[in-house]
Image (spheres, rainbow, N blue to C red):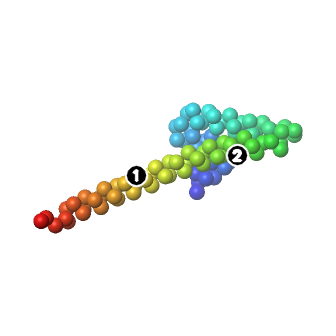
Amino acid sequence: MSTYLLAIFASPLYFLFEKKWGAFILNSIFYLSALFLLITFIGAFLAPLPWMIGMAHVMFDYRKKVVEQDASVMAKKMVEAMRSEQINEPKI
């Protein structure tokens, strides 16, 4: 839950905490450009665009990390199941 809030309100901090420096710099550019556009009256209507790009960048990376963790857990369970089948296999 807190990762989603971090992605929405302070997206560069996610990459800072994950120590992904290139992504942090890129996302900071998006975030700072959104803040700059928000400050100006003319660009206030365009400010959500770079903010949403930065937020999508964080969410894509976070979902990728979660899927990799889930796949790792699933692979470990499959290996354990295959090993238990080999141990319990009747010999002819």
Q: Which mark is residue 52?
A: 2
Q: Residue at x 68, y 43 (%)?
A: 53
Alpha-carbon distance for marks 1 and 2? 30 Å
Q: Which mark is residue 91?
A: none
The local secondary structure at tag 2 comes to: helix
Indicate the amino acid at tag 1. Answer: Ser
Residue 92 position in % (x across, y down):
12, 65
Would you say residue 66 is visible in this rendering? yes
- Marks 1 and 2: CB-CB under 8 Å? no
Q: Residue at x 58, y 51 (%)?
A: 3
Indicate the amino acid at tag 2. Answer: Met
- Relative placement, left or right, of 25 versus 32 is left
| Front-lying residue, 63 or 35 | 63
Q: Which residue is mark 1?
A: 72
Q: Residue at x 69, y 37 (%)?
A: 30
Q: Residue at x 58, y 36 (%)?
A: 23
Q: Which of disc 2 and disc 1 is earlier in sequence? A: 2
- Relative placement, left or right, of 61 versus 52 is left
- Relative placement, left or right, of 55 versus 87 is right
| Front-lying residue, 60 or 82 | 82
Residue 46 position in % (x across, y down):
80, 42
Few, some or many residues within 10 Å of mark 2 (<14, 14–19, 20+) = some
The local secondary structure at tag 1 comes to: helix
- Relative placement, left or right, of 28 versus 16 is right
Few, some or many residues within 10 Å of mark 1 (<14, 14–19, 20+) = few
| Front-lying residue, 65 or 82 | 82
Residue 70 position in % (x across, y down):
45, 55
Residue 84 position in % (x across, y down):
24, 62
